[in-house]
């Protein structure tokens, strides 16, 4: 960017070029606003460059590598199979770079000015940028996201890394210990185990402790088959260059130690004290249903406003914030934010599976033709509904759960009934039939699974 090219004032300044920020910028530009977006590093933020996209890229590669090695039952005898870690890294970086360039192209094409700098609020209508200029605005949207939380005694260094660095390794470590047991730990641990790494997970309580125990039990069984060792009800005490000692007294090998204990909002260096923006006790920015902060000129979206810390939530909030900033009467009133764990098998959830007046019916993946054909029968569907048969929640534990959960989210948002799903023709043979079959079972008319002569019993 050429010095002095900044306008004295823009209609909208977006701080942060991640998925929420760039979506907000583009939507605002579509609505006729003069928009500048300030990003200190790479457009697309953590999702495109360090988290969502890279992790799923590497998970796919690891799945292919593992599948080829274990395909004898299908008549495939591959012999000696090897992995080129450098090429794997190059592909992962190429994917992120392509998407980053695409985001910059979309911004430019929509007339959004992209400024590579850091921004600090100097008032409720002005930003100081690290490129030496200032930017005045009528409205601003904070989309600075989150960053890996720190763990005392485990400062990041050569062999102690965060989840971003774990997804940028140019070699496959012989051993890896992951501190933390939420979905990030499970995803990273599973992918490296499939690549041949000896993986340990250190859990303060247990793996995925906030999720459905039935679903987690299947994931834990698979992790055990992959050789992943989970140390429950313990914490890390100390470490060396190639090992980690636990509070339980055990010492385990760890060429790489991944600290994955959670995320913290990125707000500390924004100069929010120069505005009227308020933070909650955990450091997240307080917003209302329109994504407005306590400062009339400033909105906020994504991880920085709190749970759930998911990219697709940030995208939706970005659209809402842009429309509100442009003067429209928009609101973040979504009923459900679906969540997906790219474990093995995948777990996908939309809505709620418990509550007063809610019944849950379960249908097994063993009764789905495609699951049998692909030897992927380790899973199930649970569908939750009220007394009127209106769908309130869905849990899918299955191959392709990440794609199928969108149907569940749409059903819940539009107030669909069990009959709506059951009477909709689902393509055969696909995993999506899980949704239809679970709905049929909930209605007491299951076709491809025999529950007995009575209506299937509720679970949960």
Image (cartoon, rainbow, N blue to C red):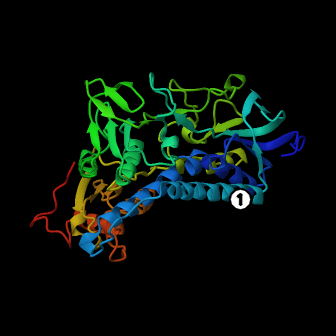
**Residue drawn where x is 44% and y is 22% of the image:** 153
Q: Is residue 337 left or right of residue 431?
A: right
Residue 60 lies in quadrant:
bottom left
In the image as oriented, which residue stretches furthest toward the front? 80
Q: In front here: 376 or 386?
A: 376
**Residue drawn where x is 32% and y is 60% of the image:** 398
On the image, the x and y values in percent for residue 458 come to: 19, 54
- The answer to whether any part of residue 415 appears in the image is no
Q: Is residue 135 left or right of residue 149?
A: right
> In the rendered image of this protein, does residue 49 appear above or below residue 95?
above
In the image as oriented, which residue stretches furthest toward the right? 4
In the image as oriented, which residue stretches furthest toward the left? 453
On the image, the x and y values in percent for residue 62 come to: 41, 57
> In the rendered image of this protein, does residue 105 appear above or below residue 358?
below
- The answer to whether any part of residue 267 appears in the image is yes
**Residue drawn where x is 40% and y is 27% of the image:** 240
Q: Is residue 302 left or right of residue 14?
A: left
Residue 414 lies in quadrant:
bottom left
On the image, the x and y values in percent for residue 225 come to: 24, 52
Q: Residues within 10 Å of mark 1 (few under 14, many from 20)?
A: some
**Residue drawn where x is 33% and y is 77% of the image:** 428
Q: Is residue 45 left or right of residue 73?
A: right
Q: In front here: 344 or 173?
A: 173
The residue wearing badge 1 is 106
> In the rendered image of this protein, does residue 162 appear above or below residue 73?
above
Count the numbered circles shown: 1
* Secondary structure at numbered mark 1: helix
On the image, the x and y values in percent for residue 29 come to: 75, 54
């Amino acid at each position: 960017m050429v010095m002095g090219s900044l306008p004295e004032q823009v209609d909208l300044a977006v701080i942060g070029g991640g998925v929420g920020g760039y979506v907000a910028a583009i939507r605002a530009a579509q609505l006729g606003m003069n928009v500048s977006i300030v990003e200190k590093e790479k457009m697309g933020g953590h999702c495109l460059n360090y988290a969502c996209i890279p992790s799923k890229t590497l998970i796919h590669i690891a799945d292919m590598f593992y599948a080829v090695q274990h395909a004898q039952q299908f008549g495939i005898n591959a012999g000696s199979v090897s992995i080129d870690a450098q090429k794997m890294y190059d592909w992962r970086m190429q994917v992120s770079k392509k998407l980053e360039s695409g985001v910059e192209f979309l911004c430019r094409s929509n007339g959004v000015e992209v400024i590579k700098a850091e921004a600090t609020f100097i008032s409720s209508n002005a930003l100081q940028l690290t490129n030496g200029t200032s930017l005045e605005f009528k409205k601003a949207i904070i989309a600075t996201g989150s960053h890996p939380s720190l763990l005392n005694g485990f400062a990041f260094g050569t062999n102690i890394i965060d989840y971003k660095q774990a997804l940028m390794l140019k070699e496959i470590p012989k051993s890896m210990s992951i501190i933390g047991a939420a979905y990030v730990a499970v995803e990273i641990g599973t992918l490296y185990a499939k690549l041949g790494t000896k993986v340990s997970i250190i859990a303060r309580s247990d793996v995925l402790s906030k999720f459905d125990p039935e679903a987690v039990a299947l994931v834990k069984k698979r992790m055990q088959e992959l050789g992943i060792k989970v140390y429950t009800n313990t914490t890390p005490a100390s470490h060396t260059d190639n090992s980690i000692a636990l509070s339980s007294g055990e010492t385990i090998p760890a060429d790489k130690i991944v600290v994955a204990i959670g995320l913290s909002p990125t707000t500390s260096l924004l100069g929010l004290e120069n505005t009227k923006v308020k933070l909650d006790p955990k450091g997240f920015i307080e917003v209302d249903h329109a994504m407005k902060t306590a400062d009339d000129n400033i909105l906020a979206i994504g991880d920085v406003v709190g749970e759930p810390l998911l990219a697709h939530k940030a995208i939706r909030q970005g659209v809402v914030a842009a429309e509100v900033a442009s003067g429209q009467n928009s609101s973040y009133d979504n009923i459900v934010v679906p969540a997906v764990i790219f474990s093995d098998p995948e777990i996908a959830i939309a809505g709620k599976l418990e509550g007063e007046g809610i019944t849950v019916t379960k249908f097994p993946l063993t009764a789905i033709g495609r699951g049998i054909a692909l030897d992927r029968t380790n899973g199930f569907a649970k569908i939750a509904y009220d007394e009127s048969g209106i769908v309130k929640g869905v849990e899918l534990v299955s191959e392709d759960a990440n794609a199928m959960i969108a149907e569940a989210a749409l059903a819940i948002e539009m107030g669909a009934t069990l009959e709506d799903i059951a009477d909709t023709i689902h393509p055969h043979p696909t995993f999506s039939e899980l949704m239809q079959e679970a709905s049929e079972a909930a209605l007491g008319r299951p076709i491809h699974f025999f529950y007995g002569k009575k209506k299937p019993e509720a679970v949960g």
